[in-house]
Amino acid sequence: MKILEGIPVSTGIAIGPACIIERPKLNIERKRIHPDEVALEIRKFHKAITELGEEIDHLIADLSQPQDNRDILTTHKMILQDVEFAANISRLVKNELCGIEEAINRHFTNVVNLFNDMENEYFSLRSSDYEDVAYRLLSKLLNQKSNYFAKLSENSIMITKNITPSEVTRVFNKNIAGFCTEGGSKNSHSSIIARSMNLPTLVDIQDLLQMVNDKDLLIIDGNLGKLIINPDKKTQDHYQKLLAEEKTQLNYLQTLIGKKCVTTDGKVIKLMCNIEIPEEISNVVKLKSDGVGLFRTEFLFMDKNRLPSEDQQFEIYRDIVKQLSPDPVVFRTIDVGGDKLSGLLNIEHELNPNLGTRGIRISLKHIPIFKVQLRAILRASVFGNVKVMFPMISTVGEILRIKEILKECREELKTEKIPFKSDIKIGAMIEIPSAAITSDNLAQECDFLSIGTNDLVQYTLAVDRDNELVDEYYIPHHPSVLRLLKLTADNGYKYNVPVAICGEMASEEKYIPFLLGLGINEFSVSPGRLLMVKNTIMKCNYQKAVAKTNQILKENTYIDVMKRIEEFRL
């Protein structure tokens, strides 16, 4: 028995035989063409683009497909129709006299390598889409038709180096139990589709193809991020039991869709979703959540050669708001470090980006870009319930400056006779100790506060949450963190300002009763965790949670705190 570790992107247990799938390599011939052949090569290119576009249109029109898939296919069509893409291909063919296949391969290889070198999950998300489009387009030009998924059998577990979004749909239709990849990222489009289909999935498993053989019995533990190869009987029996329990639990959780999130003693809790990209909206709608408590807008900036225009942003924000109306959508303005936008904003390299120019600091250093985003959000407010919040807030002075900029945006839109709602609510992210400590001041200037526990823990304890060498020091239940949470919740209550929590602590079952006991009555979690969180909250007694939380806050060490949390039975 061997155990490999990977990144769980779609939770759940899967048991089945391994089926190794290797996508056939495309043989791209490097040839020099005659200048007279340039026009012919470019005609071949446009013909293939048209044919593939028609195929994608047919798939988009197929209403039996989940909306997530249709949205992602629309993205693929946009890649095909990109004017810069066509112009670059034409330039390569004309200037370097290379065949159309080589030109396309070089273009997409450069794009994907650029994204992957950035080592950022948003770029990884986009790179898989470009790889997918490139493979399908080149397969068409080379007339290479190969049904490499034919060997997949029902209830098998697919093992592959990587998988594209369109391939996830194809393997799902084979009724496989789950799949694992050697590459991949948590928030790629492939992973999003897998989550929407509740298909247990692990990605980024080191040496996967060297460690697994065809027909090996596999167990995917999508909860712990483990792949078990040829388990012993005791392990098999354990996971068969877990699988049966999971199916029963999943069936029960589905019955909670549409029900109010209320504690046993009648306290109503608002339960919303955090989302990364627009394709996740359809899942939010299906879950009938109370809206989107955190919409990360970084995807608009992270895969572009140029900054998104106001109209481009407006159209995306508008479509999201319309789909969720009348429920709220809380847009968080761009929240990345300057190192991720250095190519767009000409920002100098920083030795420590996490403590440098990131979040609201970038926006306030680049006000014209900030105003474009704010104007787009204001314009979208006409179509539903829009709120906007600002990341990395450290002082009330930043909120006051933001209000001045918002006022300028409103005046500009009014002069231009562009409709907008003048009263959209604004909020501050509480993720820096200085923001939590002065949350009384912030509460007096904001309509709501939202606690981002991931960064709050990181900055309070001086621990890089992405550095596995200091994992042991990243302790969400450290007394200092809990006291900052309590202070923020109390100040919100004092000034009648709602306090939400949108960090990972809100998604961890063990912390939920404690957070309720603080008086936090708005939670925002990933769509995949929403029903679990709802179930936990609905089993809690609010008054008992308050009493137990007060006991926990008296503990002096994180070890004693955890003992109390583990005793938290409501």
Image (cartoon, rainbow, N blue to C red):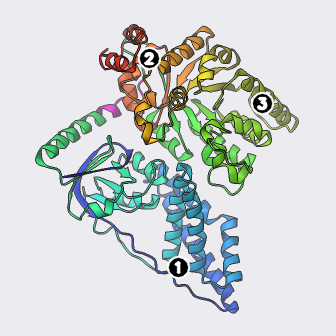
Looking at the rendered structure, the kind of residue marked 2 is Leu
Camera-side residue of 108 and 129: 108
Give the foreground label among 1 and 3. Answer: 3
Q: Callout 1 environment at 10 Å: few (<14), some (14 to 19), or many (20+)?
A: some
Q: What residue did someone put label 2 on?
A: 516
Q: Helix or strand or loop: what does disc 2 sit on?
A: helix
Give the Cα separation between the discs numbered 2 and 1.
Answer: 58 Å
Q: Quadrant of residue 298?
A: top right
* Residue located 17% across and 40% down the image: 238
* Residue located 36% across and 45% down the image: 198
Camera-side residue of 367 and 499: 367
Q: Quadrant of residue 162?
A: bottom left
Of all residues shown, which one is farthest toward the left?
A: 233
| Residue segment shown in magenta | 252-260
Residue 406 is marked as 3
Judged left or right of residue 325, residue 154 is left
Q: In terms of sequence position, does the residue under pointer 2 or pointer 3 come before the other?
A: 3
State whether residue 41 is above or below residue 162. below
Where residue 359 sits: x, y (%)?
A: 65, 36
Give the Cα separation between the discs numbered 2 and 3.
Answer: 33 Å
Judged left or right of residue 488, residue 469 is left
Where residue 270 sits: x, y (%)?
A: 49, 22
Residue contact between numbered discs 1 and 3, judged by CB atoms under 8 Å:
no
Residue 141 is marked as 1
